[in-house]
Image: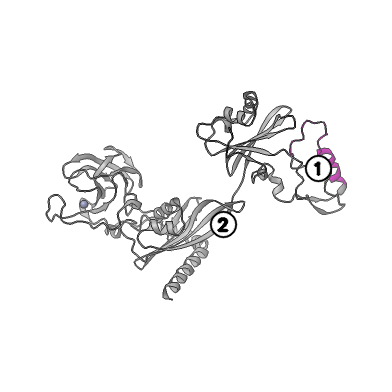
């Protein structure tokens, strides 16, 4: 049996085992003689077992020249001794270490010896997609083993006279600032995908603006979004997306801006251009907006009673099972079933505010439960007087139904940064503010042409 995903030979991870080699090692020397003594003392005696890699020590053949007086000595580019190559096996479904050791030509005894090392935690669980690497000596013995848990974390198990020694090697990705602009044709989700954003970043974007824009119902064709974010790279390749640093959303001519900022207390959050928190007391759309039908026309003619009834909420048509969120922090005051409402949940937020969620397929919280903004409280359904799956959402102020689409204009203002911190904040966002402005200008120019 031969494994397709076995890799022989050096991989980019080779470097990770000896991070000192990534950059020339520079020594500042005040006296050449002192250095000579130091090197002679550090160099391991030749009979000290297998000369496992010690990246700090130059090899005798190509040791750096010693220069008297003040000098900068650069280590040669690659002084690494001839090391046996790694055999890397990728962990598959149902694999265990015993199988992988056998496949690499080793026994359970070898495995036992490695697992006895002081850092065997990494080997307690291995997951599909991780890699287990083996390095063999001339006699076929196990010189070293490595457990590549992620591109950033590897645990290396090296043979020593005292048994295998484990070392955890971590790497830091490089951070780059990226910019992306998009125009909405049908939905934020599709515009984001088209612009090459990952799902997670689209959700992050929606989360940042979730208190000021209803992403299910507000976006219009022609709305523009500009995002400045961080990209994490490793060895020149994309590793992951970092956080959104700044973003602007122009919806029907009105522009909202958000900046990531770490305040004096060390808390990181998003604020608008004047330092008002983007986190509002209520979400504009209390459900997973990516699944809402954009062409849904709220039907004022009641679908079952076929009469014109006063409609006191907002309807979001979405597939059965779409998560419904608590619009704000609060307590569940009702969770039940009636013929007209179907499965419903009422949440009390402060003395004044109440939100209602009707026709749920499932309820996920019980009466009396405390809920957090964004917490899933149920799923969209069509229970009660509803012809198709949709969320009927109501907002009450002091017991009176208000239009959830416009009620936000009368809600209390969100938290602001303290006045004395505003100068620090404005200085921090100066550069991204200018970038967003020039991105918007560029987009307008492009459209004018
Ligand atoms: Zn309704």
Quarter occupied by the N terminus: top right
| 111 versus 150 height, above or below | above
Quarter occupied by the C terminus: bottom left
Distance CA(mark 1)–CA(mark 2): 36 Å
Residue depicted at x 64% and y 23% = 109
Neighbour class for label 2 at 10 Å: few (<14), some, many (≥20)? few
Q: Position of residue 300 (x, y in %)?
A: 17, 57
Q: Is residue 394 magenta?
A: no
Secondary structure category for the residue under label 2: strand
Q: Which residue is mark 1?
A: 59
Q: Position of residue 116 (x, y in %)?
A: 63, 26
Q: Which residues are magenta?
A: 33-53
Q: Can residue 92 be seen here?
A: yes
Residue 442 located left or right of residue 222: right
Residue 342 located left or right of residue 253: left
Q: In the depicted view, which residue is nearer to us: 182 or 268?
A: 182
Q: Which mark is residue 355?
A: none
Q: Which residue is mark 2?
A: 176
């Amino acid at each position: 049996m031969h494994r397709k995903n076995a890799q022989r030979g050096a991989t980019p991870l080779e470097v990770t085992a000896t991070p000192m080699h990534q950059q020339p090692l520079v020594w500042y020397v005040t006296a050449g003689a002192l250095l000579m003594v130091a090197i002679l003392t550090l160099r391991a005696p030749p009979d000290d077992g297998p000369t496992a890699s010690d990246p700090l020590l130059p090899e005798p053949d190509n040791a750096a020249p010693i220069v008297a007086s003040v000098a900068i000595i650069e280590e040669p580019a690659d002084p690494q001794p001839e090391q046996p190559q790694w055999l890397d096996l990728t962990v598959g479904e149902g694999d265990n270490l015993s199988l992988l050791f056998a496949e690499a030509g080793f026994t359970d005894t070898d495995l036992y010896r490695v697992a006895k090392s002081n850092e065997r935690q990494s080997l307690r669980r291995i997951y599909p997609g991780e890699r287990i690497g083996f390095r063999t000596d001339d006699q076929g013995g196990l010189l070293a083993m490595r457990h590549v848990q992620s591109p950033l974390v590897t645990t290396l198990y090296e043979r020593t006279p005292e048994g295998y020694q484990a070392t955890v090697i971590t790497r830091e990705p490089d951070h780059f600032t990226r910019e992306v602009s998009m125009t909405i044709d049908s939905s934020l989700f599709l515009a984001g995908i088209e612009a090459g954003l990952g799902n997670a970043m689209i959700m992050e974007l929606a989360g940042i603006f979730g208190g000021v824009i209803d992403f299910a119902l507000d976006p219009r064709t022609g709305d523009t979004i500009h995002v400045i974010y961080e990209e994490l790279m490793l060895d020149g390749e994309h590793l992951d997306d970092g956080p959104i640093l700044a973003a602007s959303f122009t919806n029907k001519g009105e522009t909202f801006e958000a900046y990531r900022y770490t305040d004096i207390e060390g808390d990181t959050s998003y604020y608008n251009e004047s330092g008002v928190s983007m986190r509002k007391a209520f979400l504009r759309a209390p459900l997973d907006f990516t699944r809402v039908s954009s062409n849904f026309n709220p039907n004022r003619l009641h679908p079952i009673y076929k009469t014109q009834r006063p409609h006191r909420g907002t309807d979001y048509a979405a597939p059965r099972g779409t998560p419904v969120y608590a619009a704000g922090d609060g307590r569940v005051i009702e969770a039940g079933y009636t013929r007209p409402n179907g499965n419903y949940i009422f949440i009390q937020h402060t003395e004044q505010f109440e939100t209602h969620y009707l026709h749920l397929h499932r309820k996920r919280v019980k009466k009396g439960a405390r809920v957090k903004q964004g917490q899933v409280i149920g799923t969209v359904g069509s229970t009660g007087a509803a012809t198709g799956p949709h969320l009927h959402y109501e907002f009450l102020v002091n017991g009176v139904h208000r239009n959830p689409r416009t009620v936000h204009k009368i809600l209390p203002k969100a938290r602001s940064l303290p006045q004395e911190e505003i100068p620090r904040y404005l200085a921090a966002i100066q550069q991204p503010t200018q970038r967003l402005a020039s991105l918007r200008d560029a987009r307008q120019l492009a459209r004018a042409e």
